[in-house]
Amino acid sequence: MDFFVNGQKLDVTLEDEKKVGDILTSFEKTCETNDMATVGITIDGKKIDADSFDTAAAQVLAPETKIEMTVIAAAELQNSFKQLIGTFGTLAQKMKQVPVDLQSGKDAEAGKTVTELADRMDEFCHLTALSALFPDKYGTLKIDGKTVSEFFADFSGILSDFEKGLESSDTVMIGDLSEYEISPRLEAIVCALEALS
């Protein structure tokens, strides 16, 4: 059997493990002990999802079985959140600058800021999804007094209006939303992430 974690082959000595599920259970205990969580499983080249997990776990181990695990450590997630503190702090200031950029013909600068906003929000959503794997550490994460899902439910409407403003080139709407709606919410994210540190 070949066993890989995050692309690195590990030497594994089998004891009483007979099925793939035995290996997965043992590995999960190791992850918990080391404050890590599994985020992906591939067996013999096939990604395993919730629907195929039971069938894969029942598979008998063979010399040619290849198990690949993707894991994330709580410390790694914490570092990613810490990096976003500075990023969102800078981005909040840039969003306040968007109306000025649009009024002074710096559309390209405003466009870069909007692209960065989309990329960083995507990254933040991904990290908050992963944070659910560590409920002891992140279960109490609140942004501006709201749970993450409540915050995004509120924020998604604003981002939707922002997108409409971009599509219609409504610089007044874009400017107002940038400065008075989006920037303060980015600052709220910074405060929430600082509270985690």
Image: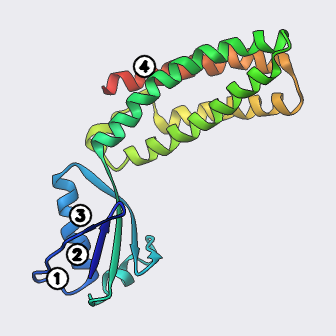
Q: CA distance from mark 3 to mark 4?
A: 33 Å
Query: Quarter holding the C terminus?
Result: top left
| Nearer to us: label 4 or label 1 | 1
Q: Alpha-carbon neighbours of circle 1 within 10 Å: few (<14), some, or many (≥20)?
A: some
Percent across and percent down for residue 151 are: 53, 31
Could you tell me if the residues under marks 2 and 4 are in contact, i.e. CB atoms within 8 Å? no
The residue identified by callout 4 is 191
The amino acid type found where label 4 is placed reads: Cys
For the point 40% across and 26% down, the residue is 193
Q: Secondary structure at mark 2?
A: helix
Among the 4 quarters of the image, the one containing residue 7: bottom left
Q: Quadrant of residue 136?
A: top left
Residue holding disc 2: 23
C-beta proximity under 8 Å, tags 1 and 2? yes
| Element assignment for label 1 | loop
**Which residue matches tag 3?**
28
Kind of residue at disc 2: Ile
Percent x, y for residue 106? 81, 16
Q: Residue at horizontal 55%, vertical 22%?
A: 186
